[in-house]
Amino acid sequence: MNYHKLTDCENDILLEFAEFDNGTGVRECHLMMHQVNPLRTFAEQLSGLVKSFDNVRKERYPDFKMVFGRCFVSDAANQEQPVSACMRKSGGVISVIEQPPLNGTKLAMWAYLQTDVEIRVLADNIAEARHNGYRHLWSSMVTAEECGAYGQTKRAFGDYIEGLSSAGYDFANDCMRTWLFVNDIDNKYPAVVNARNEVFDTWNLTRSTHFISSTGIYGRKAAPGIAVQMDAYAMKGLSAKQVEHLYAPTHMNPTHEYGVRFERGTCIKFGDRREVLISGTASIDNNGEIVHKGDIRSQTHRMWENVGVLLAEADCSFANVGHMIVYLRDSSDYLVVRTLFNERFPEVPTVIVHAPVCRPGWLIEMECMATKADMNEQFRSF
């Protein structure tokens, strides 16, 4: 990855870039955008972010198209609709979730950009990127107005699976990644897990087949009755040998041993690169126990160690990471964690948000994506 930073002083935006280009076709960019002036109103912060995003795409990335983006907001009830309305014009798919940025501002954004892809917007929150036989389907803000977190999760998965099928995708084989944002996660996460487990059973996603990489984390929608929002990424055109699931058994145990079902990471091999999707990862050991209870610094270091082992299993390292999203349970830990990340990863695009993890004892969790050049002649070029 090539890393760069830029400050847009006019709009009070810090832009962090991770660019991948191995000269074989599709180029990629992970762009993390941070408002840096908490004294601006929400309308001013949103306007500044939109203007800065438009400027950087016009001036720096005229050949790139936005595939997927996520906006992290501080107050979904008042901010979700205007953010969605503004960002929908950018192409691709935008997800909006209440996970307040912890630098004191009201919003931040991660955008995933690519060249040489055809973007087809299939619905307000579904877009497909096509290139050379591969189809990438990004879905955002999937919700359902059912009774309770269990019913909403079952219905959200059902609606998502129906949408996949109508677009020619198969849930069990083609879904690579999900994000489950759960309001009141301390109380509602068990119901979400039970619903997901039942869906997976229906599709024969078991310990002897495979699960799907995922992050289950706090997140709030604008509508007060919605307990669960799902984002997802699916891909068509892969053979089974192009997909490898990551386990890091020396450091972490299989997730099914403590009642949940997701893959800790997925490595996808293309003709000219490999891409790695790392699920939400915390300070856990290979017995499924929390490591360093109550110690944010030590949990951060153990989390890094776990992620590093997963990346190494895919023959990657933190030098290949395009972006990191960091979730904190206690917002007062922000300065400590920000300092730690600045010291170890000063260049990698990173956002730190307030979002409790699914176990109260986990103070921090992170996820990331990585890309590494890797010529695989048996696979079609990406």
Image: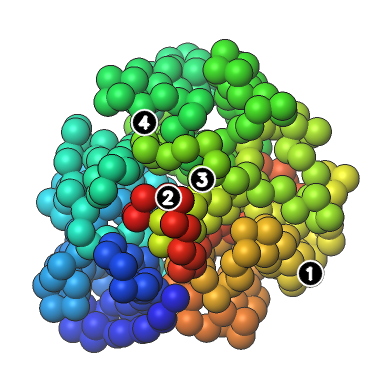
Q: Residue at x 45, y 51 (%)?
A: 378
Element class at badge 1: helix
* Quadrant location of the N terminus in the rendered image: bottom left
Q: Nearer the viewer, residue 4 or 194?
A: 4
Q: Position of residue 367 (x, y in %)?
A: 56, 56
Name the amino acid type tagged 4: Val
Gap in Å between the C-alphas at discs 1 and 3?
Answer: 35 Å
Name the amino acid type tagged 3: Gln
Q: Which residue is mark 4?
A: 142
Name the amino acid type tagged 1: Ser
Q: Is residue 184 visible?
A: no
Q: Viewer-nearest of labels 1 and 3?
A: 3
Q: Residue at x 55, y 76 (%)?
A: 319
Q: Is residue 336 left or right of residue 30?
A: right
Callout 4: 10 Å neighbours few (<14), some, many (20+)? many
Q: Which residue is mark 1?
A: 298
Q: Is residue 120 left or right of residue 350?
A: left
Name the amino acid type tagged 2: Phe
Q: Earlier in the sequence, mark 3 or mark 4?
A: 4
Q: Residue at x 24, y 83 (%)?
A: 8
* 83, above or below 115, in the image: above
Gap in Å between the C-alphas at discs 2 and 1?
Answer: 41 Å
Q: Earlier in the sequence, mark 2 or mark 1?
A: 1
Q: Quadrant of residue 45?
A: bottom left
Q: Earlier in the sequence, mark 2 or mark 4?
A: 4
Callout 2: 10 Å neighbours few (<14), some, many (20+)? some
Q: Mark 2 and 4 residues: CB-CB less than 8 Å, in contact? A: no
Q: Which residue is mark 2?
A: 379
Q: Mark 2 and 3 residues: CB-CB less than 8 Å, in contact? A: yes
